[in-house]
Image (spheres, rainbow, N blue to C red):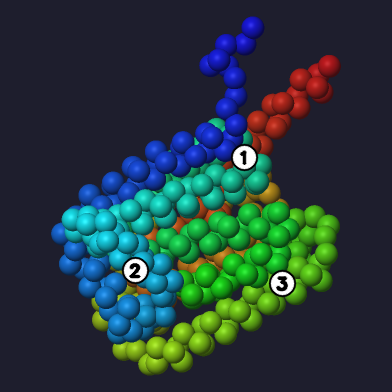
Amino acid sequence: MNSIAGKRFPFAIVLLIAAIILATATTYAQVNFLGVHFLRVQQEKVHVQMLQGTAGNPWQYRILADAIIEPVIKSTKGLGVPQPESFAFIAFRFLQCLLILSIAGVYYRKLGLSLYESLIGLSVLSWSMSLSLYNSDLSFNVFFDVAFYLLAGILILARKHIWLALLMIPAALNRETSLLIPFMLFFAVRSNAIGEGNRKRAILAAAVGLAIFAVIFVGLRIYYGPQQFLTADGYYPGIGLLVLNLRRWATWEQIATTLGVFPLLAVFIYRHWPKVLKVYFWVVVPVWFVAHFVGALVAETRLLLVPQALIFIPGALSDLAGARKLASSEPAKNQ
């Protein structure tokens, strides 16, 4: 008779429990790192500037997170919670982490990772998110970016192409870096990485998603008007910023701290990756790293969470999945 301990729990239950635990730990680590006083001063100031339309270029054009948080703050005030803004920020970050980890768990399973491998991946992702706030506030739009890319990965694998086009509405309102999502779909279909299907409909969905992005990108800039460009420590995007990133010790220290060895492990076993993951790699990683090394301070490694969550973590764990499949097939061959 099987013991209760030997029974398998449904994946959804295990995933939810793991996501809650890891989201709690991640939120605590981030809030402890920044401090509640910082949230009351800096985070609130930036939030108010976003609502007033004076946050500057490019931050003002990343309106989604602040538009969602404001009703949460108002509801918190109505409940008489002390320091309602800070409470709302912390609660929102917990829910955001819970969303990211839940989506990531589903995504890793759809890529063929086992439950245990997926849980390892979630633990690594939680670690990466916990250590990614160098020179930063809670950066809600960056974390939404991670969620949208992971959700896009799921929709492509599930062939829900129309939903991916609709996903571009919140994704484009959130951050201009969502531009690569329609290209993930386009090249996944063109390379037959997700099997047979209605290629014309998929390509049309990618084109619609790109058009939605363009309309929102331009519309936000017309609505809010020209904004003062906020430089990265006085550096404008270009060669100067690239050289600064390459020469700063903080760049490589923070990359190692946040991403660990997973990018190296993933690239080393590239041959074991699912085909669709290889497509995501070539669509996202080269452009992502070049754009951020040229246009941002890479030591702020929250900016690298998208390739870490979407590609490097499942890529590094693909070898475990491949070894498991090989081991399970060997007894059959020996019979």
Please state which of the two labelled residues, at mark 3 or mark 1, is closer to the viewer: 3
Q: Residue at x 53, y 62 (%)?
A: 148
Q: Residue at x 27, y 75 (%)?
A: 48
* Marks 2 & 1, CB-CB < 8 Å contact: no
Of 64 and 119, the residue lying toward us: 64
> Which of the two labelled residues, at mark 3 and mark 2, occupies the earlier sequence position?
2
Residue 89 lies left or right of residue 317; in this view the side is: left
Residue 52 lies left or right of residue 177; in this view the side is: left
Please state which of the two labelled residues, at mark 2 or mark 1, is closer to the viewer: 2
Alpha carbons under labels 3 and 1: distance apart: 28 Å
Of 78 and 182, the residue lying toward us: 78
Alpha carbons under labels 2 and 1: distance apart: 38 Å
Which residue carries the number 3 mark?
A: 205
Q: Secondary structure at mark 1?
A: loop
Q: Position of residue 95 (x, y in %)?
A: 41, 52
Q: Position of residue 47 (x, y in %)?
A: 29, 72
Indicate whether 96 appears above or below 319: below
Which residue carries the number 1 mark?
A: 113
Q: Secondary structure at mark 3?
A: helix
* Marks 3 & 2, CB-CB < 8 Å contact: no
Q: Is residue 183 visible?
A: no
Which residue carries the number 2 mark?
A: 70
Q: Secondary structure at mark 2?
A: helix
Three-letter amino acid code at the position of disc 1: Leu
Indicate whether 56 appears above or below 104: below
Which residue extends farthest left?
37
Q: Quadrant of residue 154?
A: bottom right
Three-letter amino acid code at the position of disc 2: Glu
Quarter of the picture containing the N terminus is top right
> Which of the two labelled residues, at mark 3 and mark 1, occupies the earlier sequence position?
1
